[in-house]
Image (tube, rainbow, N blue to C red):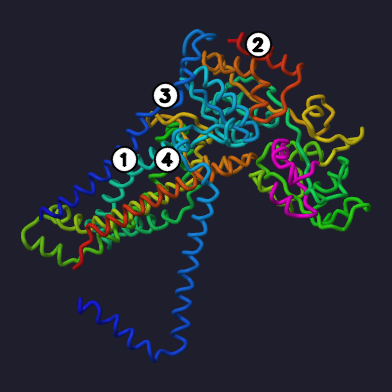
Amino acid sequence: MAILSTPRSAVQLASRGRPLKEHLFRIALLASLAIALVFLTLLIVYVVEEGWPRLDSTLWENQPSIRRPETAGIQSGIFGTLWIIGLTALMALPTGILAAIYLEEYADKTKWYNRLLELNISNLAAVPSIVYGILGLGIIARWMAFGFTIMTGAITISLLVLPIVIISAREAIRAVPPSIREGSLALGATQWQTIYRQVLPASIPGIATGSILALSRAIGEAAPFLMLGAATLVRFNPEGVWSSFSVLPLQIYSFISRPQEEFAVLAAAAIVVLLAILLLMNSVAIWLRNRYQKRW
Amino acid sequence: MTSGQRRLSAVATAALVVSLAAACGGDAKPGSSESTSSAAASAGSEGGQLSGEIKVDGSSTVAPLTQAAAELFGEEQAQVKIPVGTSGTGGGFEKFCAGETDISDASRPIKDEEKAACEAKGIKFTELTVATDALTVVVPKENDWATCLTTDQLKKMWEPAAEGKVKTWKDVDAKFPAEELKLYGPGTDSGTFDYFTDEINGEEGASRKDYSPSENDNDIVTGVAGAKGGLGYFGFTYFEENADKLKAVEIDSGSGCTAPSVEAAQGGKYTPLARPLFVYVSATAAKRPEVGAFLDYYATNINAIAKDAKFIPLNSEQEAKLKADITTLKSQG
């Protein structure tokens, strides 16, 4: 406690004779932070206010309807999104984490092919999502003949988030101090035992946070689904991985382009639901990090 | 170290639970909530429940009509799934001719190259006219000079040669004020764009490029309503819903000014901007019982569906033709 408070009070002491420039810089920093927060708040207040009349149970109990916008729901979109995210998590997380373990713990970085691999993964993380949509349409939907199904969507989104999962998992694994590994190896553990019992548990908070943030990104994607030909108007929930589907962002997109005012309200309410799912996932990420974080 | 392993398995369990919850949630629901009232009411006319999936894609203009039909049909046949996509007329035909969809919505007739693609894949189809649309040219309410425009004046505004030259209303007609002309229209992927350019500029796809394009017609509404010299065009429904903000321009194609309206479009007086809307059905798909039943339903209730989805219904002649077309289509199978 005493140790923790010392640096803060030192800063406070020093601040008395602080030059004007430093104050200005501080204000600039705070202003930048305020801009981000103000816009986020504005956005949330705006959509909640706009969507308020429709934020009731009919929203998730009913299916979308073109004929009755005032009671139309978004159930098929909610389920479609959960299916896609669930399957993506099942496919992308294990592959991504295993790839990160290989790259961090096993790969010989002096070899050219490993460096090429790393370079490619970084590049892939920056590829626009619509490009993955084209890939999904051409290869998964058509060439592999998976059609316009949940499976196609989930594989495409898995490919989209995979580089992000790999990169964040690598960061987390790299943050485990080498002394932990060395200690484990020195006590006679094999490399796999060291990874499984020491490195992985220690890096789980970082890996989990990174993975959830990657999935949160995927949840808001509309572009690849548009390419993949996911239907915008679906009145049934997916029944399996080979089912046709729609996702929330696509439904929102189709609602806002309808002429009736009621659809704009419905779209706002759907955005609130999407934001809620997103914030829930991010909160889980923060909780996981705080719960399992370990300091050395 | 056991605490480490416990931590690992806790996270893994959490992840599993989340994904399972997603999966189970989907399994539990289908059929239960939506179809309770409808399943009981049906069963009569068709003699038994059909099932299966009818894949529809294509024009976002026609989609609400097919969607309304699917909704109403779903009240009789709850087990038939009809996902409706909105890839646009062109995007829809691409999938239709690849055999990926059963029905394609279109706001313009199929093009020759699209026909060729269908033929190459051996896909036979029938074109059905399902509703009418009156492309409506709109200006803001405060515009008091443009009540009626001739097709020539429209051409002067929209033709490729106007690009960078026709900047004010005065450039269109000396009688108009020198208010800046701000043009809004659908993007080039839209069937509406194809139809308008074909009818007004004389060549499909030929348009000036310095206008504000949008795939979302509501953006056109906002744009036109907010600019005194604004002008835009879109489907009649968008005007009807925004009649408080916008004024529909009467169109003179040589035989006097005609305002867009349900009657004028049905009666063929609103030329040249009244356009038929189509649905293309694959012949192979039409042989499937659920598709056949859906088409019958579509034909029998076409005008109720059109009214429900706020489209201009067919006139009696067109309606009779639609019914005959569907009968022919089904008898081929």
Determine the CA span between mark 1 and mark 3. Answer: 22 Å
| Same-chain status of marks 1 and 2 | yes
For disc 4, the marked residue is A81
Mark 1 crowd level (few <14, some 14–19, many ≥20, 10 Å Cα): many
Q: Which amino acid, mark 3?
A: Gly
Nearer the viewer's eye, disc 3 or disc 4? 3
Nearer the viewer's eye, disc 1 or disc 2? 1
Tally of numbered tags: 4
For disc 1, the marked residue is B19
Q: Which amino acid, mark 1?
A: Ser
Mark 4 crowd level (few <14, some 14–19, many ≥20, 10 Å Cα): many
Image quarter in which the C terminus of chain B is found: top right
Q: Secondary structure at mark 1?
A: helix
The chain under label 1 reads B
Q: Between B183 and B21, which is closer to the camera in this rendering? A: B21
Q: Which residues are magenta?
A: B221-248
User: Residue B238: x percent and y percent?
Assistant: 70, 39
